[in-house]
Every structure is written in C-alpha cells, then in structure tokens.
Amino acid sequence: MGASKNAIKIDPDQLVGAELDEYARHKGLFDPVQVFAMRGMPDGDIALLAISPNNFFILLGELKATERKKLEKIGSKIEQYDLSACELATKVREEKENKNKSFRITDALTKRDKRSLWIEYWRAIYESADVEGIFWKLSWQVRAMLVSMRYGSASETDLHPYVYSKSRQGATIYGESELIRLSNNLLDIWSESHASGEGGKLALEQFILSV
C-alpha cells in the first residue's frame, strides 16, 4: 500500500450507496493511493472500504460494540488513544516550543545578529509577550557575556557550562567596552520607562537597532 502526504477529510454521511463505492474506487491524479479521514462511522456496506486500494481513517469518540464488530469483520486495524495523554503530549510540545522561542532573542543578541534580534523581538510582541520579560532576558544575556569575559571557567560563575560557553563566544564578538555600553543603555531604558510610566517597547526596539 502507498501513502499520501495529506488526508482528504470527508463527511461520513456522504458515504452511502454509490458515493461510498466511488470513494472506495477513487484514484488520485498524482498518487494512486489516497488517504481519507472521517469523523464517524459511514452508513452503508463498509466492506467496500476493505477491498479499496485507498486508506480510510475513521475517527470515533466512542467505539460501540456493533461498530467494532463491523470493523473487525473487514479486518480493520483498531487503535485506541487516551485523549488526556494526547493533550499532555501536546502541552509538553508547546512548552518546549515556547522555551525555544524565548532563547531565540538571546541567541540573536549573543551572535550580534541585529536583523534576527529585531524580528524575534517583534514576533514575541505580536504573540503577546511581556515587554518587561524581554527586557530582563536581554539584560541577563548582556550580564552573562560580561561575566564570561571576567572569569576563566563556568565553575567560577553561576552560569551553566553551556550558557557560559555561548556567552563567552558572544563576548568576543562585542568586546568588554561595548558590552558595558549595552548594559548602561538597558539600565537607562529601565529608569526612564519607570519614571515616565511608559512600557519601554519602542525604547527597547531602539536598543536592539543600536546593537
């Protein structure tokens, strides 16, 4: 059996009589084997699906005994999934993706990649990230680069060895005087934004463009 890259979603209520036979015998223009997905058991003689060259995925919230009997009769493969486990896996994946996103900004700063830094900054803003949170990430990374310059190994600092190594690489790109300048600029942004009551969004963008 072949495989199609994308499943074609169909309404199970359509799979009756001649239409059921049509889907079972259907051949794609570019892929001889098609993949169809439907939510719910189709009416009609599902034995047609068993002799079809195509693949059919039937998604059921609850598998009734009569439905199981029909599927087993035509040799269908039945798999059961724990929804709570799937939701947990999705949550873990999303948290990992969010964590990776948060590192994109600091990675771009470390590499002195102004374009990527600006893009990741506004991407985070559009995704409703907290401006103050971004500020502290940038401040922390500048501090980490300064610390890595002043100490010979990660064990002499409070930095993880991997973070120390990356920060030290970034520090060689900037140099100590430039990092001190960036640190002072961030301190000014913090003081001015709190004094004015403004969020500091544009001031932080100006900082990024000065990198």
Image (cartoon, helix red, strand yellow):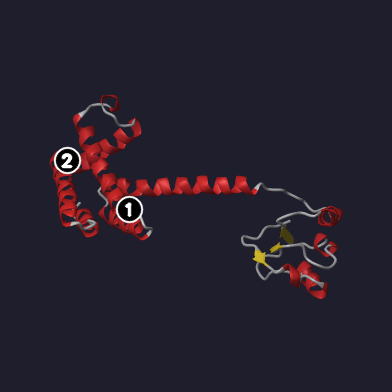
Q: Residues within 10 Å of mark 2 (few under 14, many from 20)?
A: few
Foreground disc of the pair 2, 1:
1
Q: Amino acid at mark 2?
A: Gly
Percent of width and height locating residue 82: 66, 46
Front position in the image: 153 or 91: 91
Q: Position of residue 34 (x, y in %)?
A: 70, 64
Position of residue 47 relative to residue 21, above or below, is above
In this rendered view, identify the residue nearer to me: 107 or 173: 107
Residue underneath mark 1:
130
Residues under numbered marks 2 and 1 in contact, where contact means CB atoms less than 8 Å apart = no
Q: Is residue 113 above or below residue 34?
A: above
Q: Which mark is residue 175?
A: 2
Q: Earlier in the sequence, mark 2 or mark 1?
A: 1
Q: Secondary structure at mark 2?
A: loop
Question: In the displayed structure, would residue 136 be above or below residue 51?
Answer: above
Residue 168, position as x, y percentages in the image: 25, 36
Amino acid type at mark 1: Asp
Quadrant of the image for the N terminus? bottom right
Real-space CA distance between mark 2 and mark 1, rounded to the nearest whole angstrom: 29 Å
Residue 175, image x and y in percent?
A: 17, 40
Query: Callout 1 environment at 10 Å: few (<14), some (14 to 19), or many (20+)?
Result: few
* Residue depicted at x 58% and y 49%: 87
